Image (cartoon, helix red, strand yellow):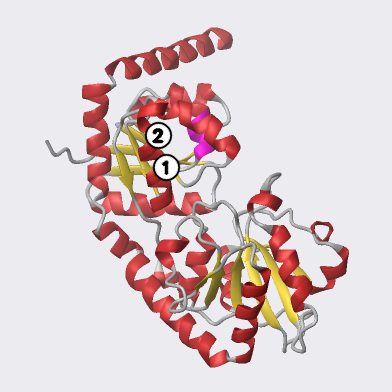
């Protein structure tokens, strides 16, 4: 039975992060559908969380870490979006999927992974494939000029990511350095620009081997408009990651109009038709990556053509209006409510008991 006006909390870990932007896009679509969504930044303390949760009909976690910390203390039906599973994330997230009334996944590989493991891991709730998207209006601007300390004749390759303890391996930085070691001998100068698009960047020159350090610029943290303008100014975007849920900057660079070279991780196999609107590469085949970059350097018109095709394709398929037109969001939450009512009554009772206990203990401490 259809139910209008659902109150839905959309939970992200930090304001301005990419998952916060995705949550806000969902909030806009839910509002248009007559619901009452609110984007919530996950609190550090469970007492605050338990006090706030009584007002919602459902809670949707967009970040795995807030889901890990808070799902077991959420007294209403839970929806979670899973982007990817690292070794640590896999160990922490899978046991908690039993708390979910619906699990959303953002790429086909993740959908296959979780569908195959449902019986083995002991959770059976609906598994829904959803897409991420972009707002085309954000991408109408003049590209930023080249950095002053970079040769204006250089071929500039870009890479955007936040920095954390496991990123060197997961993001394939060793592969990036191997490519740069070959390209540094090119007649046309080649430069690599790092961005920190989703919060203060911790990338610094010490992360780069000394023999190629002069080829790398760290743009640091940029606010959203400057980040997109700088992303647009790149000659190509190179992603050699081993594990990704997006990577969202690939989608953003396509929306800006530009060439993508990426390993087949996350949503890339669904975004990129290799040779038509970008290139899918093997991260361990340094020679092939270098040759593809050389081809782009020697043929700017080819790069322009592929970049324009990528932009047209991205705007058409992954503009938020197109994304939401093919995946009715109301059904995600209505199905979650039905599942929780029919299949997870005991789980809901346990989580409500935990929440009430935390509120009670909090009141005792405050007396």
| Position of residue 341 measured from the top left corner of the image (x, y, whole percent) | 23, 23
Residue 280 percent coordinates (x, y) = 51, 69
- Comparing 281 with 62, the one in front is 281
Above or below, 80 against 313 in this view is above
Circles 2 and 1 in contact, beta carbons < 8 Å? yes
- Measure the alpha-carbon separation of dots 2 and 1: 6 Å
| Residue 99 seen in the figure | no
- Residue labelled with disc 2: 117
Residue with the most extreme right position: 210
Residue in the image at 44% along x and 69% along y = 272
Which secondary structure is most common in the magenta stretch? helix
x 74%, y 66%: residue: 178
> 10 Å neighbourhood of mark 1: few (<14), some, or many (≥20)?
few
Is residue 99 in the magenta section? no
Placement of 53 over or under 223, stated as above or below = above
Residue underneath mark 1: 113
Front residue of 341 and 223:
341
User: Would you identify the image quadrant in which residue 36 lies?
Assistant: top left
Q: State which region is magenta.
A: 64-68
């Amino acid at each position: 039975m259809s139910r209008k006006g659902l109150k839905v909390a959309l939970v992200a870990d930090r304001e301005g992060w990419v998952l916060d932007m995705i949550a806000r896009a969902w909030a806009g679509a839910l509002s248009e559908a007559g619901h009452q969504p609110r984007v919530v930044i996950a609190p550090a303390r469970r007492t605050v969380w338990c006090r706030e949760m009584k007002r919602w009909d459902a809670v949707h976690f967009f970040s795995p870490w807030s889901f890990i910390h808070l799902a077991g203390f959420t007294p209403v039906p839970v929806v979670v979006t899973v982007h990817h599973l690292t070794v640590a994330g896999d160990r922490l997230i899978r046991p908690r999927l039993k708390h979910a009334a619906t699990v959303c996944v953002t790429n086909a590989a993740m959908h296959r992974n979780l569908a195959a493991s449902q019986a083995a891991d002991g959770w059976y709730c609906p598994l829904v494939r959803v897409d991420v998207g972009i707002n085309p209006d954000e991408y109408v601007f003049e590209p930023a000029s080249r950095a002053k300390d970079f040769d204006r004749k250089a071929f500039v390759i870009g890479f955007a990511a936040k920095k954390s303890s496991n990123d060197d391996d997961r993001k394939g930085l060793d592969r990036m350095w191997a490519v740069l070691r070959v390209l540094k001998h090119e007649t046309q100068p080649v430069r690599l620009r790092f961005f920190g698009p989703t919060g203060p960047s911790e990338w610094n020159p010490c992360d780069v081997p000394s023999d190629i350090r002069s080829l790398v610029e760290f743009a640091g943290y940029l606010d959203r408009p400057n980040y997109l303008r700088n992303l647009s100014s790149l000659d190509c975007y190179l992603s050699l990651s081993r594990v990704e849920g997006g990577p969202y900057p690939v989608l953003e660079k396509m929306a800006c109009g530009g060439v993508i070279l990426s390993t087949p991780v996350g949503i890339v196999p669904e975004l990129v038709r290799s040779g038509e609107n970008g290139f899918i590469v093997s991260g361990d085949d340094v020679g092939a990556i270098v040759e593809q970059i050389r081809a782009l350097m020697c043929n700017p018109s080819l790069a322009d053509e592929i970049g324009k095709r990528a932009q047209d394709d991205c705007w058409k398929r992954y503009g938020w209006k197109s994304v939401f037109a093919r995946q009715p969001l109301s059904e995600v939450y209505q199905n979650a409510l039905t599942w929780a009512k029919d299949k997870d009554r005991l789980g809901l009772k346990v989580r409500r008991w935990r929440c009430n206990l935390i509120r009670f203990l909090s009141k005792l401490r405050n007396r």
